[in-house]
Amino acid sequence: MATFLYKLGRFAFRRRRFVALIWVALLAVAGVGAATASPPANDNFSIPGTEAQKAFDLLEQRSPGGNPQGATARVVFHAPDGEKMTDKANKAAVEKTVRELKSGSDEVAQVLDPYKTGAVSKKGDTAYILTSYKVSAMELHDKTRDALKEAGQEARDSGLTVEIGGDALEQMPETGATEVIGIAISAVVLLITFGSLVAAGLPLLTAIIGVGIGISSITALATTLGLSSTTSTLAMMIGLAVGIDYALFIVSRYRAELAEGQEREEAAGRAVGTAGSAVVFAGLTVVIALAGLAVVNIPVLSKMGFAAAGTVVIAVLIAISLIPALLGFAGNKVVSRKVRKAAKAAKAAEQGAEGQAGQAQGEEKHNAGTRWARFVLRRPVVVLLVGVLGLGAAALPAASLELGLPDDGSQPTDTTKRKAYDLISDGFGPGMNGPLVVMVDAKGSDDPKGAAEQVRKTIHDVDGVAAVSKPQFIDKDGDTATLTVISKYKPSSVDTEDVVHHIRDKAASLKAGTGAEVLVTGQTAMNIDISQKLNDALLPYLGLVVGLAFLLLMVVFRSLLVPLKAALGFLLSVVAALGAVVAVFQWGWGGSLFNVEEPGPIMSMMPIFMIGVVFGLAMDYEVFLVTRMREAYVHGERPGQAVVTGFRHGARVVTAAAIIMISVFAGFIGSSESMVKMIGFGLAIAVFFDAFIVRMAIVPAVLALLGKSAWWLPRWLDKALPNVDVEGEGLRKQLGPDSEAGRDERDARDARDPDADLTRV
């Protein structure tokens, strides 16, 4: 591995114009594809194998003209104090709005007049028009949305309050200025870390190119593959973070090789051969974690995982090919001005340069990473206990985790969707915001109408049910009916979930008594089934991801205990991060800081998606930091000294990488999409816990306590495992300064470039 990447790094450096041209061409092709592509599809939560999905499929089969997953909208009217919606003038304004909606677009499937459907509150002060569309929300034309927004303007002018709810108003999520701030913070951190504008700019440039290719490809394939708008947002979030980090490690190692006296091309080859190997395996762990989301068998989650994994693959390929090519263009400016001055002084006085190098090396041994590592080695038990207990305390709120999917009730209070939600709750009860749809398949019944009526009576007596509509037969044969069931509770509550389960519990006895099959569906029931399926898949997914990554890390580190320690540390950090998410988004602690208007259940996909992403990112730091320790140990250093060496070379870079990743993820907290906001916060806090507490404190403490046994591997297993040489040990033997291969390499370089000595820093 290291030898192949070494050759790739040198090739990219030497043929930099060709390599750069390839990546620019890929970016252009992806950009053209995105510019000519159709808008992305809607976020349809299809969940094969569940009752809600079975009912949806049956509805489409029995009533082909309908679209149960088409967009819907509610135009809600509220009369001023002392007036009612049944007053003549107010009724006329509403009926005119009904006519406007019907004629506003060809995409409208149905507009229900509230005075004919009974959609007027008991007090008479609130009414709503229910509008359904032939296509999904993301497929609606702007003209249709504009007609919806303008509907009821005359009613507003007459003094009525008019608000619009439903998914028909959904558009591409906005991230806001905080995303730009996150990138700006990354730039500052890179500049401080490298002390060079060029070196700081390279990771940002390559990350943006990688994300540009990834997001453009997702946009171009969105309609073909059914990718949602959220998919591209999450891919951008992860692609930016890993793209900057991977480039950071390559550039940092390149500068270290230059400092040791290597020529630029040789330094690029060695940087890609060593740090590049770590990048490849770190990226592979992220890809495994993201692609593993497919085991949940929820298509939208699988697509998000594959899309994000593809962006990570692009980031890895850019790091090991485009970065060395750009380093060739950068020249000596990749190092700071201070280092360049020292290099000039070295050429003038070789002896003095050796003294300065020795002095610099001595100073490097006592940097912050070295001092921290020595502190941990002196007090490993104390550091271990403080780290574990601190994360354990942060994890406590996770015991109260409640899962659900957000509805309009979680929107900011100043939005029209939230205002419409509140008006419906006040006028009709909270359950009206998420009605359940009960499907009665009476093909096996001798009396379909009688069976449907019996189902209605049974459901009406279920505890927690506020109202049940009369059966509506939807097919020509008259044996398939739907009933609308209104819960007494808000859609995202545990109580509504209990109502759904109670109705489903009655299904067996109803089928035995009437011969009709009863299925509960609707968006609320769909959300409940999603949560249940995600809960059931959590442990198998965790076992698959952790197991595969354990095997991969065992190959990388040639150890049993180091991968085990890495997996346990990850579990601790991810549970602590989930605890923080619960505290902020479910309990509302500090919610105002993150624009959390209404605390509520945690999004169903959050835990499993967070586990997948955080595990991959956590392994990044494990690979980058522990690889240098393993490298030092393999070259003969004592276990404790190897830990110090690993921190001396890697702590500053890992710290910078973690701050960059945190700032990028935190930038998405400003998103208008609640899912993106929650995931941005969760990933940012998880990286903080994992990088600074687990990898920087718990890992060296555990390694200090384990000593040599940390690197133990049974001899038979050592022979069975492939040798991937991530540390580049084989490469060093092949290209050592006194080796024949090293001399041949220098002779070949000199033959290609007689002035190669002028390129040395």
Image: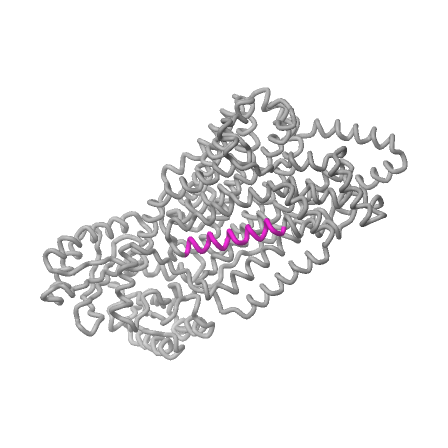
Number of on-image labels = 0
Give the left or right position of residue 64, taking residue 303 as reference. left
Main SS of the magenta segment? helix
362 within the magenta span: no
Which quadrant: the N terminus? top right
Query: In this rendering, does residue 193 appear at all?
Result: no
- Whether residue 96 is situated above or below residue 200 in the rendered picture: below
304 within the magenta span: yes
- Whether residue 543 is situated above or below residue 533 in the rendered picture: above
Q: Give coordinates of residue 214: x percent, y percent.
A: 56, 57
Residue located farthest toward the right when viewing the structure as drawn: 348
Which quadrant: the C terminus? top right
600 or 733, which lies in front? 733
Q: Quadrant of residue 362?
A: top right
368 or 34, which lies in front? 34
* Residue that appears at 32% across and 48% down: 532
* Residue that appears at 34% across and 56% down: 47
Query: In this rendering, does residue 712 appear at all?
Result: yes
Q: Give coordinates of residue 439: x percent, y percent.
A: 22, 62
Give the left or right position of residue 661, taking residue 609 as reference. right
Q: Give coordinates of residue 276: x percent, y percent.
A: 63, 43
- Whether residue 366 is situated above or below residue 113 in the rendered picture: above
147 or 533, which lies in front? 533
49 or 605, which lies in front? 49
Give the left or right position of residue 298, taking residue 714 as reference. left
Q: Give coordinates of residue 518: x percent, y percent.
A: 19, 58
First to last magenta residue range: 300-318
- Whether residue 124 is situated above or below residue 592 in the rendered picture: below
